[in-house]
Amino acid sequence: MEQLLVSNHISKHYGAKLALNDVSFQIMPGRIVGLLGPNGSGKTTLIKIINSLISPSSGEIYINGNKPGVESKKVVSYLPDKTYLNEWMTVEGLIKMYADFYENFNPERAYDLLSRLNIDPKMSLKKLSKGNQEKVQLILVMSRKADLYVLDEPIAGVDPAARDYILETIISNYDRNASILISTHLISDIENILDDALFLREGQIVLYDSTDNLRTTHQKSIDALFREVFRC
Amino acid sequence: MAWKIDQNRPIYIQLMEILESRIISGVYKSGEKLPSVRTLATEASVNPNTMQKAMSELDRKGVIHSNRTSGYFVTENLEIINTLREEASKNIIEVFFMNMSSLGFSDDEIKTRLRHYIDNYKKV
Amino acid sequence: MLKKVFKYDIYGNMKLFSMLYLIVGVLFIISLVLNQVNKLIPEDIQAIGLTNFVCGLSMFLMYFSCMLLVGASSLLCAVLFYKSVATNEGYLTHTLPVTKKTLVLGKSLAGLVYCFISLIIGFACAAIHTAVVFPDTFNSLLRNLKDSFYIATHSDEFTPLLVISVIIFILAFVAQVFFNINLYYCCVSFGQINNSHKIIMSIVAYIVYTMVIQFLSGLISFGFSLAISINPERLQNFQAYMDAHPDLIMLIISLVVLLFNIGFSALAIHISSKTLEKKLNLQ
């Protein structure tokens, strides 16, 4: 089976500061991987490089064998940790836009998920609550049949009920040919759905293994392991 | 039915335990078709891969068997289910005895208290 | 994909530009009405000065807004381009499955459409207002326009050559606006090179461009004068040809301007897309 995502000696520096230091790893299809690390560890930098929003200082990224570009963007569905959509657009308008640009976007699925949340598609983003805005962004991302989903802090700043909803959406969307990369620092909420955990500290990988292996080896939860590894 | 999962232990093992206890208690009867991997994973809020691993292990143990692509079925072999029940009871009794001993009771004192409970307090 | 980028850029900026057009339209109507009413008021009340002041103010606002609309639309497009490329909106812009070239071209075409509409609305309001409120001034302006047109084309009939010359002239004008937009976009893209001072870098790029153009123009003029002084016959031959075919003047100049602007626009788009591909650092 071919690797879905390959990171090959990725480094990124901003002036004197080294944000990522020789990061190399692979993700196979059908895995849900947690990108875990404290703030400033380089998680978002790595994610932006995968989505070609930042160019690396050295090293390469390959997605299905392609460098980040038009082909990779067709198969990568990215949820940033910010609101990035034009607030004046209606949910309906956004769905039409996504359907226009992405062949693998499924509008029926999007409308189905929206109806379950009682969000009126005719409303503009501006009129929705912040929580609902974030859910709409998640729905748009998850309604694409992508090979790689990259979710940057999908549950931070979200109430527990919404958290459950988001995790449920992720699980029910699971496809054994696709992978999900979730960056978060709220580990205990999410570790039950992770296949693998990748620990990032100060731009370097300190750990990359399956979660159940880690639980067997270290006799503790991923959350507890995280606290141990990243003790202040 | 919430799945109680302890994050400090491998999850797939706990999923196996919970499925086994459901089979023992008759929630999933012998010969009955189990819900799909995806349904169970969503119910348990775990990764479908992990649920799949648990069910593959149960398949290997013979507790359940897969019928080509129509999913997993509880075994018709009642002996296997009884063995599971016996094993589960052994674990529970071991833990019970360990706890009672650590309170300071001797074996005879434990037997007396157990009989007393069954005769007077056990809810039917 | 180009059509889609173009379409959604038009949609995205529609609200903003519609608002601007509305403001200009409202100022136009207010000023028109006030000034016409003012003409009907008898002389002695007019002398109070208040009505004149109000009319003058509304007129000033109207002409000023027209000027601003025409002059600042391309700059506004550049600001909107910056927003879509370098702020949070960039998270959407840069993850769409389109090449950077398609992105820049689609957005500059959309910008061209809005700049053109701004031009038409701005000029129309100013022209109609002048025609209605100052008919004499308008008529003399119109006469001057006719005379200039004759000088440029040396014909008063609708020959095919005239029609072609006018068409090429209009195209050259459109191309000039298009180049202007692409120049701004190029400066914005160039500004991405410096992480912490993107806007300043864009402005620096524009200043550098202006200086380079000044320098090159000076160089070309110098070279030209040198060539003429060395071989004055060439110039005489050229002048003789132009005197023999005065109707070609506008056509030739327009053609040159058209080609230069298209060529330089393509260059600007190429630079913009290459810079965005290699040097993007979205915060």
Image (cartoon, coloured by chain):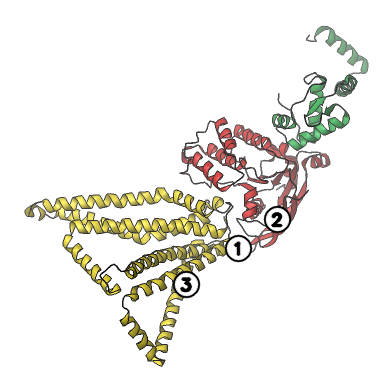
Chain colours: A red, B green, C yellow
Q: Amino acid at mark 1?
A: Lys
As helix, strand or loop, the secondary structure at mark 2 comes to strand
Q: Would you say B51 lies left or right of C111 here?
A: right
Label 2 sits on residue: A62
Subunit of label 3: C
Task: Looking at this view, name the residue that lies furthest to the left.
Answer: C44
From this view, report whether residue B38 is shown above or below residue B120. Answer: below
Image disc number at residue C261: none
Which residue occupies 64% across, 64% down? Answer: A16
Label 3 sits on residue: C208
Label 1 sits on residue: C278
**Relative image position of residue A150 (x, y in whole percent):** 65, 46
**Relative image position of residue C245 (x, y in whole percent):** 32, 79
Depth order, front residue of A83/C131: C131
Q: Amino acid at mark 3?
A: Val
As helix, strand or loop, the secondary structure at mark 1 comes to helix
Query: CB atoms at circles 3 and 1 under 8 Å apart?
Result: no
Depth order, front residue of A209/A7: A7
Subunit of label 2: A
| Quadrant (top left, top right, bottom left, bottom right) of the C terminus of chain C | bottom right
- The quadrant in which residue B68 appears is top right
Eye-nearest disc, 3 or 2: 2
- The quadrant in which residue C162 appears is bottom left
From this view, report whether residue A163 is shown above or below residue C191. Answer: above
From this view, report whether residue A12 is shown above or below residue C204. Answer: above
Eye-nearest disc, 3 or 1: 1
As helix, strand or loop, the secondary structure at mark 3 comes to helix
Q: Would you say C172 lies left or right of C47 here?
A: right
**Relative image position of residue A157 (x, y in whole percent):** 58, 40
Q: Amino acid at mark 2?
A: Tyr
